[in-house]
Amino acid sequence: GAFFSPRVSVLAKPVTGWSARLSTGTGFFLPTPFIDEIEATGLSRLEPLGDLEPERGRSISLDIGWKRSALELTATVFKSTIDDVLLVHEDDDAQIARPLRIVNATGPNRTAGTELIARLHYGDVDLIATHMYVRASEPDAKTGMRREVVLNPRHSAGIDFLWEIEGRARLGGH
């Protein structure tokens, strides 16, 4: 089949040092057995893929940036919705090694959050600090009730160091 995936982004620089970007778009992903839960257990217990719909996503984000001299700050707010997301259903009625089946969710996967980035650039050295907050939920494959997405941390943070050595090499750490 054919898919239409429009994306639009608008950048504004209202005053020196400030920027704002609003982005929105759609996308799709064709059904595949290679999803996190199956990669963890292997393909041996997986039933053949049935009649599955492609996942279809919509997203929107707003970035606000500020830069002055060696310091750059960026704040992002984002939200996305994925319809027909693929979930793994385990057959409780099976007698032996309970087979796994991939199904389309009965409702959307919803994700929203924020990201904060601070970058300090001094000569050949960059120091980058990040923080991300994510709240994501999906329908449970068995009950259809909403649940938090597993293996998705609510908060994550990091500090990265990058040193560019006379344009020949880069050294970094996290």
Image (cartoon, rainbow, N blue to C red):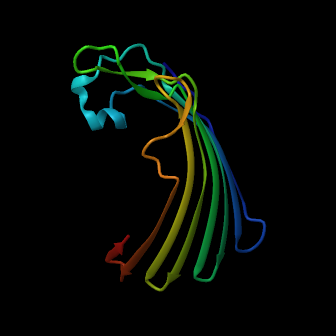
Residue under the image location 38 percent in, 70 percent down: 174
Which residue does the image show at 70% across and 65% down from the upper left? Answer: 19
Most extreme residue toward the bottom is: 123
Q: Quadrant of residue 30?
A: top left
Q: Tell me if I can see residue 65 in this picture.
A: yes
Tell me if residue 8 can be seen.
Answer: no
On the image, the x and y values in percent for residue 20 come to: 71, 60
Residue 31, image x, y percentages:
41, 25
Residue at the spot 38% in from the left edge and 79% down from the top edge:
163
Against 42, residue 21 (above or below) is: below
- The residue that appears at 45% across and 28% down in the rendered structure is 86
Say above or below: 140 vs 36: above
The image quadrant that residue 89 belongs to is: top left
* Position of residue 36 measured from the top left corner of the image (x, y, whole percent): 36, 38
Is residue 134 found left or right of 75 in the rendered image?
left
Q: Position of residue 142 (x, y in %)?
A: 46, 22
Using residue 134 as the reference point, say whether residue 152 is left or right of it. left
